[in-house]
Each structure stands twice: as structure tokens, then as C-alpha cells.
Image (cartoon, rainbow, N blue to C red):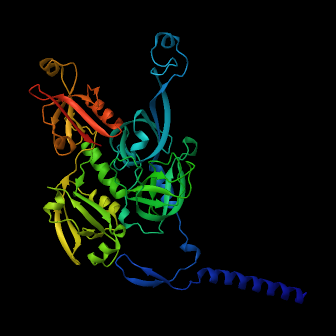
């Protein structure tokens, strides 16, 4: 009996020692790890494997999910009938198969959004609400609202919509500049539709400052946060959140050959979102600053040029050209300079320049750190206003077109000029229209040999053009003019 008790005691002690050993193993630190700080400092840290050191996302998830909404949109799509039309077939109109007779139908789409103000302002992606005729928002507690578009910014793919509500839960905005590689983040949204509403996935920050050129030729500001948090169609416009429950990005895109998540997802940094959202709410459009340079990353230069520049690293952008009259020229920057920092923040490539400049308004000042002939120098720049994007409508109702502003002619103006339709050039501004010889007060009658009646017609014809844009019209004195320019 005593021997049995002794055996049990030994087993308990052995089990206790084993458990103690597991605990101590979990508390045991690994060999020191070399860590390089952002300022270049080096230190050695140990990694502790205690259970308390594993990331806990419960607070961030449970608080942030309340402010993420499901967005459903209705759009009108135009399709053409392929059935045989006897009238067309026998009388020679069209091709006999109904082509040329568009039929409109409704289509549904969905995405996500983040409530940023308790009075109903929600940030989402431009591509989620673009072309929508109806927008519906469902909150995490199943309230449904109709929403209206406050403003959109295709350059950053950010949009603001609003619902008529008060005291909604919001998500505080963090600082995306402080995100570190390897930092844990959560992606919250509605992947693949309403059935998976309020889905939360976790991952790490895989990279910063990513860009994804799409070949469209449209101006875009891209400095994406790349993560490996699982994101799928429907997550667009949803929240990227840090462990504190702060919004650090708006999920926007995935890279995939299948259309579904393949390990990479991208988010617009919240520091860009803050600026864009503020302008869209206050002005309805973005007041974008412009530096006025053409640039390329130092790392892409020929080795000979890199050696001539006497650089200490491959970070920074090389100024290929400085636009005449630009903020950069006024600040004294010139071709061959290498920009390495803006207001003390490091510049690595063109995307990081765009991201930093996008944080400023026209008229704001910043200190540009650059290298010229091997010496680091600084210059204060006062940013100019960027030219409006084609199709952007100003507060006076005029529409931007290659630097100029366009408006539809009034009935009185058409009668006075003896024309049936046309689009007035309200102002020429700076851009391709001015360079081609356009004058204020002139009227555009044709774009690429097709008549136009309103600014939207001009934008559509120009966008459809494969190469150049050819414009015909009459000036304020009734004299016919012709000019053209490349896209």
C-alpha cells in the first residue's frame, strides 16, 4: 500500500516537474534578436514565449466591428439585345440582330464602409459606389439606411457617403505612418456578400508604400499598406485596424489570378483617408497640393549616374524634370536633385512622395531635404494647387477638362449664337487645352467629329479616343477654330 502511494506521489511529482518544465520553457527567452530602428540605431532584444505575449485581438475586434457597415449598391447596366429584329433586317437598319437597341437593367453590388462620425458620415471606396443609383447601408446591429454620396476621389479610391442617423458608433483614426513591418492588424468587412457580414481576419503588415499600376493612364495616388489578412470581394471599403482598435487603413484591393484571396491584400493608409475625407465633407472635392516634378526612384538609375550623385543609399527620388512655374521651381529645386525627405519623413520612392504631398493643402509649406552634388541641402516649398481631374465638378457647376472648365450653354446663349447645342469654355487654366490654343468664351461643337451638347459629352468622347483629341468650335466672335492634342 505504501509502495502504491509512493508510486502515485512520484508520478504526481514527475507530472508537476513536467508541467513546471513546460511553463519554464514557455517563459524561456530565445537568443537575442538584432533589431534596426527607423533612425538606424541597432539594439538586441529577446523574444519571450510566455502565453501572455501572444496577441489578443478581442478588444480591437469587438469595438471596431460596431463601426463597420455593409454597403449594397444598385447600378444601371446597359445591354444590347441579340435577337433578330425583322424591321432592321428587312429595312437595312443595324445588322438585323437588334444591335443598336440598348436595354437597361438593374444590377446589385456590395462592399463595406466605416463610420467615421456619429452623425452618419461613412468612408468607403470610390469603386464601391461609382455609378450607383441607390445605396443602402446596414449597420452591425442590423439597422438599415438609405445613403447618399457626399463626394468621391478616384485618385485615392476613397469616397464619403452619408446616412440620416445620429449617435452611431465610430472608429477612431490612428496614424498609419507609425505602422511597423510585422505589426498585427485586423481586416473587418463583408467578404463575398451579406451572408458573411462583419467578418474579422487577422494578419501582419507585409509591406508599406506599395503601388499597383493598372495601365489605365489615370492619375492615381498609391502608397498601399500590404497585409496578409484575408480579404475578398466585398471587403472593399472595410476597416484595417491595429491592436488598439484604431483605424489604420481602408481595405481596397487584392492581387489574385482567381478573383479570390491569394495571400495579399492592400489598404489605403488612414493618413491619406483623413485628408481626403475631410476635404470631401467640407468642400465636396479634394483640394490637392502639387509639387511639380517628374521623378524616378534612385534605385532605377544607371550605375554611372548613381555614382555621380555620391549617394549613401538607394533611397530617394531623382528629379527628372521640374515644371515651369511650379512650387518645386520656386523653391529652387532642379533637375538632378535627389529628394530624400519631406518634413523629416524619409522618401524611398515615388509612391512615398505622393503619399506625403497628399497630406498637404495648396498653400501649405514643407521642408524638402535633397542631395545636390553630394551635399545634403534643404529648401522650403509652398505647395501649389493641383489641376482638377477631368470630369470633376466645381461649386459653380463647371466641369474640369485638361485644365479648362466647361459648362453647358444656356438657351439664351445658343439663341444668340445661332447654334443648337455646344459646350462653353468658361476658363482655360493651365493644361493641354491652354497649350493647344483654347480661349475662354469659346464654344466646343465637336469632339473627334461627334457633336457635344454638355460637358459630360466632351469627357466621354475624349475618354473613348484611342490616341488624339480633335476639337472643333467657334470663338466668342463666331470664328471657327480647330485644334488637337494627344491623350
Q: Residue 35's image quarter?
A: bottom left
Q: Residue at x 22, y 67 (%)?
A: 368
Q: Is residue 425 above or below residue 402?
A: above
Against 420, residue 372 (above or below) is below
Q: Is residue 400 visible?
A: yes
In the picture as drawn, the residue positioned furthest to the left comes out as 477
State the quadrant of the C terminus: top left
The image shows residue 468 at horizontal and vertical percentages of 29, 39
User: Is residue 246 visible to the viewer in this orientation of the structure?
Assistant: no
Residue 280 picture location, percent across and down: 29, 45
Along the viewing direction, whichever of 137 and 75 lies nearer the viewer: 75
Identify the residue at image location x=36%, y=80%.
40
Q: Residue 15 vs residue 386: left or right?
A: right
Task: Check the image and name the residue furthest to the right.
Answer: 1
Q: How many marks?
A: 0
In the image, is 343 to the left or to the right of 476?
A: right
Quadrant where the N terminus is found in the figure: bottom right
Q: Is residue 168 left or right of residue 366?
A: right
- Tell me which residue sits at (39%, 44%) in the image: 126
Q: Quadrant of residue 93?
A: top left
Judge from the rendering whether residue 1 lies leftward or rightward of residue 121; answer left or right.
right
Towards the viewer: 131 or 484: 484
Percent of width and height locating residue 337: 23, 69
Considering depth in this image, is 23 or 256 the residue closer to the camera? 256
Residue visible at 30% across and 35% down in the picture? 459
- Residue 348 position, x and y percent, is 34, 68
Amino acid at each position: 500500500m505504501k509502495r502504491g502511494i509512493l508510486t502515485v506521489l512520484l508520478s504526481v511529482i514527475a507530472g508537476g516537474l513536467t508541467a513546471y518544465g513546460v511553463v519554464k520553457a514557455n517563459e524561456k527567452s530565445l537568443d537575442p534578436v538584432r533589431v534596426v530602428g527607423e533612425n538606424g540605431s541597432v539594439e538586441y532584444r529577446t523574444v519571450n514565449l510566455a502565453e501572455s505575449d501572444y496577441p489578443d485581438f478581442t478588444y480591437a475586434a469587438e469595438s471596431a466591428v460596431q463601426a463597420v457597415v455593409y454597403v449594397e449598391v444598385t447600378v444601371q447596366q446597359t445591354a444590347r439585345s441579340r435577337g433578330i429584329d425583322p424591321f432592321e433586317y428587312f429595312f437595312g437598319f443595324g445588322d438585323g440582330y437588334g444591335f443598336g437597341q440598348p436595354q437597361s437593367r438593374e444590377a446589385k453590388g456590395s462592399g463595406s464602409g466605416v463610420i467615421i462620425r456619429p452623425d452618419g458620415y461613412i468612408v468607403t471606396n470610390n469603386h464601391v459606389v461609382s455609378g450607383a443609383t441607390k445605396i443602402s447601408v446596414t449597420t452591425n446591429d442590423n439597422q438599415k439606411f438609405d445613403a447618399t454620396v457626399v463626394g468621391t476621389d478616384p485618385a485615392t479610391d476613397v469616397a464619403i457617403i452619408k446616412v440620416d442617423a445620429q449617435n452611431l458608433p465610430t472608429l477612431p483614426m490612428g496614424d498609419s505612418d507609425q505602422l511597423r513591418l510585422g505589426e498585427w492588424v485586423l481586416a473587418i468587412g463583408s467578404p463575398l456578400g451579406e451572408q458573411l457580414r462583419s467578418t474579422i481576419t487577422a494578419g501582419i503588415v507585409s509591406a508599406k508604400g506599395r503601388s499597383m499600376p493598372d495601365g489605365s493612364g489615370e492619375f492615381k495616388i498609391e502608397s498601399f499598406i500590404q497585409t496578409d489578412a484575408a480579404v475578398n470581394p466585398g471587403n472593399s471599403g472595410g476597416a484595417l485596424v491595429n491592436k488598439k482598435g484604431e483605424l489604420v487603413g481602408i481595405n481596397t484591393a487584392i492581387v489574385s489570378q482567381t478573383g479570390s484571396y491569394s495571400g495579399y491584400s492592400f489598404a489605403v493608409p488612414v493618413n491619406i483617408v483623413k485628408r481626403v475625407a475631410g476635404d470631401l465633407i467640407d468642400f465636396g472635392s479634394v483640394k490637392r497640393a502639387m509639387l511639380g516634378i517628374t521623378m524616378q526612384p534612385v534605385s532605377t538609375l544607371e550605375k554611372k549616374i548613381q555614382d555621380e550623385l555620391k549617394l549613401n543609399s538607394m533611397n530617394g527620388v531623382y528629379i527628372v524634370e521640374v515644371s515651369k512655374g511650379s512650387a518645386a521651381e520656386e523653391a529652387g529645386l532642379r533637375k538632378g536633385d535627389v529628394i530624400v525627405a519631406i518634413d523629416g519623413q524619409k522618401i524611398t520612392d515615388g509612391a512615398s512622395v505622393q503619399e506625403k504631398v497628399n497630406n498637404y493643402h495648396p498653400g501649405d509649406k514643407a521642408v524638402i531635404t535633397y542631395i545636390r552634388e553630394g551635399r545634403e541641402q534643404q529648401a522650403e516649398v509652398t505647395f501649389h494647387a493641383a489641376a482638377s481631374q477631368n470630369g470633376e465638378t466645381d461649386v459653380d457647376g463647371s466641369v474640369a477638362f485638361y485644365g479648362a472648365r466647361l459648362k453647358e450653354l444656356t438657351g439664351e446663349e445658343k439663341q444668340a449664337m445661332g447654334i443648337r447645342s455646344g459646350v462653353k469654355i468658361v476658363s482655360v487654366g493651365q493644361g493641354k487645352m491652354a497649350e493647344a490654343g483654347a480661349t475662354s468664351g469659346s464654344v466646343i461643337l465637336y469632339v473627334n467629329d461627334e457633336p457635344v451638347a454638355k460637358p459630360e459629352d466632351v469627357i466621354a468622347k475624349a475618354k473613348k479616343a484611342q490616341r488624339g483629341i480633335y476639337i472643333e468650335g467657334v470663338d466668342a466672335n463666331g470664328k471657327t477654330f480647330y485644334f488637337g492634342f494627344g491623350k
